[in-house]
């Protein structure tokens, strides 16, 4: 699974409950850029973020932070 | 072939709705409500819960036709004038007469609209002539209320399916669609009696000035798939020379948003802090004045809120930083911009195609029917001028209700298996190449060329060169490599983008006049020419597989427009500001 260097969407793995089966952020992302890595942790797989926020708003443990992508910051 | 690419999944339904944003859910809901026994399937390339332009809600209804504030006739007249006369008034009237009932129904579902102390809808004036803006300060949850209705009715939903080409029966009627599962890479054939396309705008056409491919005004999932699919199925497309160009927050590329701030006292100014346009309502004519100001010594252009009371600004922030594009606040924070003390720098967006904001898209009549039997279009994809979110919902409803009648008693149409074989090969080819071009590079180059050759002012020779470049990129698409199903989805979207770019260029070249302000401003044909061009410019796929361009007359008006009113939108400039 590809990974973005310096991702604008970051996940606090201490809060993330993907290991318990949660897939909320992966499900709601319109551009489908969040994925599980080999260790079962969520990461930003593609630099295709619309900075729209469903992932951050729907995350049950508030583990996600969306930043404005660098090019337009 | 690898195992991932050989599987073909088969599905069937009666009414297939493609696109789960705004129009699509309403089409599915209204089809199911009207005929509960009808099988309805709602597809989206993302997830219906958070799909489309209103993934994070909407901050206002831009075109509410509320008794006591406006009549349907007044609305039809205003939209006719705002579009330099080239509209299908019957379609706009179909929206206008259903606008109020749709708002009341959404209200009954829990969607919040602003009301005054008597409980009446608090309509504001933003348009040049009438009052049609209904604020939604708590409009962030609209998708959730709509999704509840989808669940209540038990409508079948299939997420992460990207429709690529429609299935057409030998007699020309619609027979379903073909799609790709962007997670598994499965190729899917869905047979249907009627298909309602609700795939939104072509929002990934021009390249944002930031250079970030996904930094678009529209939801970047809306790559123009529907225009491409409708075109290849034989449907007539309309007004593709009437581009969507928006006045946006510079770099952020989201709405400022004048519809929200205007009623609170915000407005657009030039670098001298002076107003230069009478109305901030988005029209081609307003955009032309905006562009002239940027090009003059008076630029850049700003949104001005720093004269407002602190509590007013807080109210504005509590809407703008929560709804529709809630990262606006984060962006301003990064730039150290505070509405209380700073002007907000604005710019002109890259081009797109969007019936919701301008007047272009798949041609539909007042029943949302395209020119292909059994194929409907609704929302930003169809050409019902300035239809916005509420128009998408109403036209979704109209399409859903008409489609169940069309499908009743019809057998699933047969189709030629060759269509499926050809599409299967086209769709999966990038996955099977050992090496090839990166889809991101090809998309970047194509969209940069769109900026270079199609961004108004339009110039004949530049658009001709653009067509050459687009044709070369079409050839490059035969060499694109995708490493997985996600990249394959992005690669397929480029096919739709190049179709939209080519058709937009051809329609623009065909109309040898200027119209709709900046949307179709041709510097080598600067004047409006009603004698020759008071008509729609239409395009469809000809028998030779090439685009066929022709004129469609504007139907006689059902709401007359007086000679003294028809140019009202061409008088938006405050003359003193230009001195």
Image (cartoon, rainbow, N blue to C red):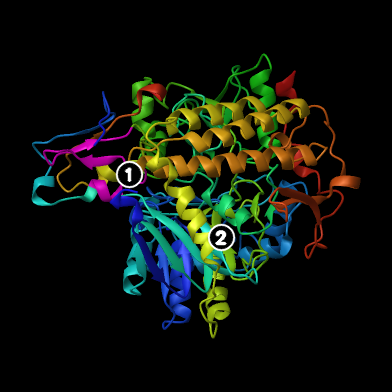
* Residue located at (31% from left, 40% from top): A33
Residue situated furthest front in the rendering: B1
| Crowding at mark 2 (Cα within 10 Å: few <14, some 14-19, many 20+) | many
Closer to the camera, B180 or B140?
Answer: B180
Label 1 – label 2 distance at C-alpha: 24 Å
Question: Dot 2: what SS?
Answer: loop
Parent chain of label 1: A
Position of residue B59 measured from the top left corner of the image (x, y, whole percent):
44, 47
Task: State the residue at coordinates (41%, 45%).
Answer: B489
The subunit letter for the residue under badge 2 reads: B
Q: Nearer the viewer, residue A19 or B383?
A: A19
Q: Nearer the viewer, residue B52 or B330?
A: B52
Q: Residue at x 49, y 48 (%)?
A: B426
Residue at the farthest right position:
B531
Residue on which the image places disc 2: B378
**Residue B151 appears in the picture as rendered:** yes
* Label 1–label 2 contact, CB within 8 A: no
Residue at which label 1 appears:
A32
Q: Position of residue B204 (x, y in %)?
A: 51, 38
Q: Tag 1, which secondary structure?
A: loop
Image: magenta residue range: A25-46
Looking at the rendered image, the quarter that the C terminus of chain B falls into is: top right
């Amino acid at each position: 699974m590809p990974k973005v260097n310096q991702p604008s969407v970051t996940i606090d793995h201490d809060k993330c409950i993907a290991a318990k089966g949660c897939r909320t952020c992966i499900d709601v992302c319109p551009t489908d850029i969040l994925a599980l890595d080999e260790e079962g942790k969520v990461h930003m797989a593609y630099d295709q973020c619309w900075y729209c926020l469903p992932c951050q708003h729907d995350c049950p443990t508030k583990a996600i932070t969306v930043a404005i992508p660098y090019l337009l910051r | 072939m690898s195992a991932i690419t050989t599987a073909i999944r088969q599905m069937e339904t009666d009414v297939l709705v493609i696109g789960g944003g705004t129009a699509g859910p309403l089409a599915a809901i209204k089809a199911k409500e009207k005929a509960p026994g009808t099988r309805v399937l709602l597809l989206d390339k993302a997830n219906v819960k958070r799909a489309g332009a209103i993934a994070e809600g909407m901050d206002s209804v831009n075109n509410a036709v509320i008794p006591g504030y406006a009549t349907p006739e007044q609305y039809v007249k205003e939209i006719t004038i705002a579009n330099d006369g080239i509209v299908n008034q019957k379609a706009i009237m179909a929206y206008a007469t259903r606008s109020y009932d749709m708002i009341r129904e959404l209200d009954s579902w829990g969607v919040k609209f602003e009301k005054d102390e008597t409980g009446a809808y608090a309509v504001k004036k933003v348009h040049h002539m009438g009052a049609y803006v209904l604020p939604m300060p708590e409009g962030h949850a609209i998708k959730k209320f709509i999704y509840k209705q989808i669940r209540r009715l038990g409508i079948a939903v299939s997420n992460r399916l990207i429709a690529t080409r429609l299935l057409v029966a030998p007699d020309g009627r619609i027979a379903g669609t073909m799609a790709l599962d962007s997670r598994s890479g499965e190729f899917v054939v869905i047979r249907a009696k009627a298909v309602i396309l609700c795939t939104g705008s072509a929002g990934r056409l021009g390249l944002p000035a930031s250079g970030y491919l996904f930094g678009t005004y529209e939801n970047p999932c809306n790559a123009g798939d529907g225009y491409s699919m409708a075109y290849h199925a034989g449907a007539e497309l309309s007004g593709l020379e009437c581009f969507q160009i928006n006045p946006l927050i510079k770099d952020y590329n989201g709405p400022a948003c004048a519809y929200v701030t205007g009623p609170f006292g915000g407005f657009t100014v030039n670098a001298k802090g002076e107003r230069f346009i009478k109305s901030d309502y988005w029209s081609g004519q307003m955009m032309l004045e905006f562009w002239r100001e940027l090009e003059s010594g008076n630029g850049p252009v700003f949104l001005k809120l720093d004269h407002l009371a602190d509590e007013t600004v807080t109210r504005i922030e509590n809407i703008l930083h929560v709804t529709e594009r809630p990262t606006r606040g984060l962006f301003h924070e990064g730039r150290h911009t505070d509405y209380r003390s700073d002007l907000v720098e604005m710019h002109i967006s890259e081009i797109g195609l969007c019936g919701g904001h301008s007047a272009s898209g798949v041609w539909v009549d007042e029943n949302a029917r395209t020119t292909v039997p059994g194929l409907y279009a609704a929302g930003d994809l169809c050409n019902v001028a300035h239809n916005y979110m509420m128009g998408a919902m109403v036209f979704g409803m109209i399409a859903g209700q008409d489609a169940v009648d069309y499908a009743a008693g019809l057998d699933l149409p047969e189709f030629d298996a060759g269509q499926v074989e050809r599409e299967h090969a086209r769709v999966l080819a990038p996955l099977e190449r050992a090496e090839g071009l990166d889809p991101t590079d090809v998309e970047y180059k194509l969209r940069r060329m769109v900026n270079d050759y199609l961004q108004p002012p339009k110039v004949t020779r530049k658009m001709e060169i653009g067509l050459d470049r687009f044709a070369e990129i079409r050839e490059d698409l035969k060499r694109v490599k995708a490493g997985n199903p996600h990249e394959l989805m992005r690669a397929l979207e480029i096919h739709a983008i190049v179709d939209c770019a080519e058709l937009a260029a051809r329609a623009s070249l065909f109309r040898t006049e200027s119209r709709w302000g900046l949307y179709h401003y041709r510097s080598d044909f600067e004047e409006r020419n009603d004698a020759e061009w008071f008509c729609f410019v239409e395009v469809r796929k000809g028998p030779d597989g090439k685009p066929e361009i022709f004129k469609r007359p504007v139907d006689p008006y059902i709401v007359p427009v007086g000679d003294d009113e028809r140019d009202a939108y061409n008088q938006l400039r405050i003359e003193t500001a230009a001195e």
